[in-house]
Amino acid sequence: MKIGSDENGEFTFIDIVAIASFLVSLQNLDENLTQNDKQDLQNELAEQLNKVVTEIHQHLEEQDNKIDKILEVIKR
């Protein structure tokens, strides 16, 4: 299973930066946050999650299309 954003599923620099950013944000959760800060953080994380899920869905859809084409060639 390939999980990176590279064409070959390998991690790119952007992937590493995103992971590092996520880890730093986890460390910062221990700070005192106001309700608005919590809501803003929740919204930001939801947007990031939605973006990642959309990218994964697109990638899987591309893979499905490739598999369908391969199966068509094999059936001939």
Image (cartoon, rainbow, N blue to C red):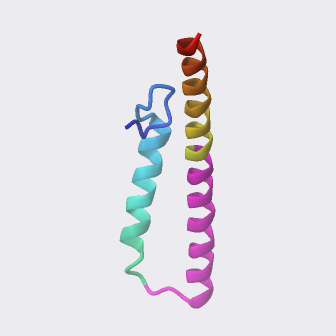
Judge from the rendering whether residue 56 lies leftward or rightward of residue 31; answer left or right.
Answer: right
Q: Residue at x 57, y 73 (%)?
A: 41
Farthest front residue in view: 76
Looking at this view, is 74 or 67 the one in front? 74
Q: Quadrant for the C terminus, please.
A: top right
Q: Above or below — where is 58 with respect to 62?
A: below
Judge from the rendering whether residue 53 lies leftward or rightward of residue 30; answer left or right.
Answer: right
Q: Residue at x 59, y 46 (%)?
A: 57
Farthest top residue in view: 76
Q: Residue at x 61, y 20 (%)?
A: 69
- Is 41 magenta? The answer is yes
Looking at this view, is 26 or 66 the one in front? 66
Q: Above or below — where is 15 with respect to 26?
A: above
- Is 38 magenta? The answer is yes
Q: Residue at x 63, y 85 (%)?
A: 36
Q: Quadrant for the N terminus, please.
A: top left
Q: Position of residue 61 (x, y in %)?
A: 61, 38
What span is colored magenta in the figure? 32-55
Quadrant of the image occupied by residue 72: top right
Q: Above or below — where is 65 with respect to 52?
A: above
Q: Position of residue 44 (x, y in %)?
A: 61, 67
Q: Position of residue 67 (x, y in %)?
A: 54, 26
Number of numbered markers: 0
Q: Position of residue 10 (x, y in %)?
A: 41, 31
Q: Above or below — where is 27 with respect to 65?
A: below
Looking at this view, is 12 or 61 the one in front? 61
Judge from the rendering whether residue 10 lies leftward or rightward of residue 39; answer left or right.
Answer: left
